[in-house]
Amino acid sequence: MRRCKWCNLENPLYVEYHDKEWGVPNFDDQYLFEMLILESFQAGLSWECVLNKRKDFKIAYDNFDIEKIIHYEEEKVNELLLNKKIIRNKLKIKASVNNAKIFQCIQKEYGSFYNYLITFTKGKILYEVDKTTNELSDNISKDLMKRGMKFVGSTIIYSYLQAIGFIYSHDKECSFYKEKE
């Protein structure tokens, strides 16, 4: 089977992610939240680095329970900073707590984070390859930053939209490539 050029075939976790999760539409708010937090930790790093630590992030972040994360205080932030199994960047950790609060505000405003996203996507899936940003990621990024989120630049949001299935981007040489459904 041929896979996207970015997929490290030596890493079974990465291959499984590529084959079974990346680009597969999953609009459950719990998943959308988890992926947004994980993608924000990718800034300046590779997705493979974050993916390799995903299970440890899940444990450290109380299974991405937004109700717990929005109440993290300095003690919990310090605990995360000492956890050698996750990415220990103080700015990203503090941003994850802040972003959780904003994510929840968006859920309350729109009924769900998915409902918020479809105000931009109109429920359509884009099919495109070899891009790292587009008008959609620019617009969502700008809005999230205006609301106060951090580590949600257009490139991170583009990657996020690919991961959750709003942008389908398998390489043309990949066995999973398709132009439209």
Image: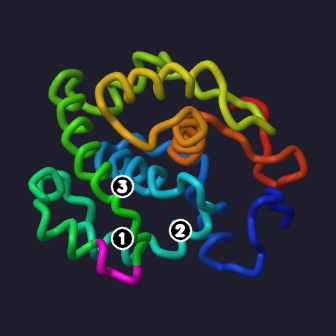
N-terminal of the pair, mark 1 or mark 2, is: 2
Tell me the SS state at disc 1: helix
Is 126 covered by the magenta stretch?
no
Decide if residue 4 is on the left or right side of residue 158.
right
- Determine the residue positioned at 63% across, 62% down: 46
How crowded pointer 1 is (Cα within 10 Å; few <14, some 14-19, many 20+) is rated as many
- Determine the residue positioned at 56% across, 32% down: 154
Q: Nearer the viewer, residue 6 or 138?
A: 138
The x, y position of residue 39, in whole percent, is 48, 52
Alpha carbon distance from label 1 to label 2? 9 Å
N-terminal of the pair, mark 3 or mark 2, is: 2
Alpha carbon distance from label 3 to label 2? 19 Å
- Identify the image quadrant of residue 180: top right
Tell me the SS state at disc 3: helix
The x, y position of residue 94, in whole percent, is 28, 54
Picture disc at residue 51: 2
Q: Give the number of the mark in front: 3 or 2.
A: 3
Q: Is residue 149 above or below residue 137?
A: below
Q: Residue furthest right?
A: 173
Please name the amino acid that badge 2 sits on: Leu
Q: Is residue 82 above or below residue 146?
A: below
What span is colored magenta in the figure? 81-85
How crowded pointer 2 is (Cα within 10 Å; few <14, some 14-19, many 20+) is rated as some
Q: Which residue is mark 1?
A: 57
Please name the amino acid that badge 3 sits on: Leu
Decide if residue 32 is on the left or right side of residue 94.
right
Q: Give the number of the mark in front: 1 or 3.
A: 3
Q: Which residue is mark 3?
A: 91
Please name the amino acid that badge 1 sits on: Phe
How crowded pointer 3 is (Cα within 10 Å; few <14, some 14-19, many 20+) is rated as few
Q: Nearer the viewer, residue 26 or 60?
A: 60
- Determine the residue positioned at 46% across, 57% down: 41
